[in-house]
Image (tube, grey):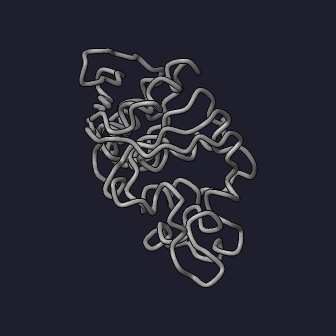
Amino acid sequence: MSGFRSVTSASVVLHQTNIDTDQIIPARFLSTTERAGLGRNAFNDWRWQADGTPNPEFAFNQPQNEGRSILLAGRNFGCGSSREHAPWALTDLGLRAIVSSEIADIFRGNSLKNGLLPIVLDEADVQELMQRPDDELTVDVASRELRTPDGRIYTFPLDGFSQTCLLEGVDQLGYLLGRAPEIERYETEHAR
């Protein structure tokens, strides 16, 4: 996982509400512990038709959305089961940030551990952003801001530990391993 300071991108919009983790990555694709390749199966039942061809109506299959790394989604995104494969699939799909008015707690935690930034804004703000998906939004982890090209700034909540992990590109274990010398020094100084 690489450090994440900021990203600037237009958005992919999914107006649906209550998008659960089984819609993000269906259970039949959970047999792997490999993250690479899961993006192909992200939103599988919406992205692909029965014959395996892309559904041209689905947002991620539309040419103008190719390469976009910010998702604007309806409220209650990531509800359902606690599968960590959901943020794995979304990051493998190329996403760096999810913006919604409500993001499920477990999904939020799993996302932060895997370098995907869940951003919660007021419903009216999300709906306004959805009306302008081609705007180049800038998500700045260090300042905890989402900025629009016309100068609007939306601050979002992000706890300090998660912010540090995102900026450094580590999960909790990586954070601790990166501080091993400090931990060892403390243990040596405080040994009985």
Residue 119 in the image: above or below residue 157? below
Residue drawn at x 49%, y 41% is 112
For residue 4, what is the image quadrant? Answer: top left
Residue drawn at x 36%, y 22% is 144
Numbered-mark total: 0
Task: Return the x and y of residue 127 as percentages of the image width and height.
Answer: 53, 26
* Residue farthest to the front, as pictured: 57
Residue drawn at x 28%, y 31% is 138
Could you say which is closer to the camera, residue 83 or residue 132? 132
80 left or right of 58?
right
Task: Return the x and y of residue 182 as percentages of the image width and height.
Answer: 31, 37
Task: Return the x and y of residue 111 as percentages of the image width and height.
Answer: 52, 45
Task: Return the x and y of residue 102 as percentages of the image width and height.
Answer: 63, 29
Residue drawn at x 37%, y 57% is 94
For residue 66, what is the image quadrant? Answer: bottom left
| Quadrant housing the N terminus | bottom left
For residue 123, what is the image quadrant? Answer: top right
Could you say which is closer to the camera, residue 19 or residue 129? 129
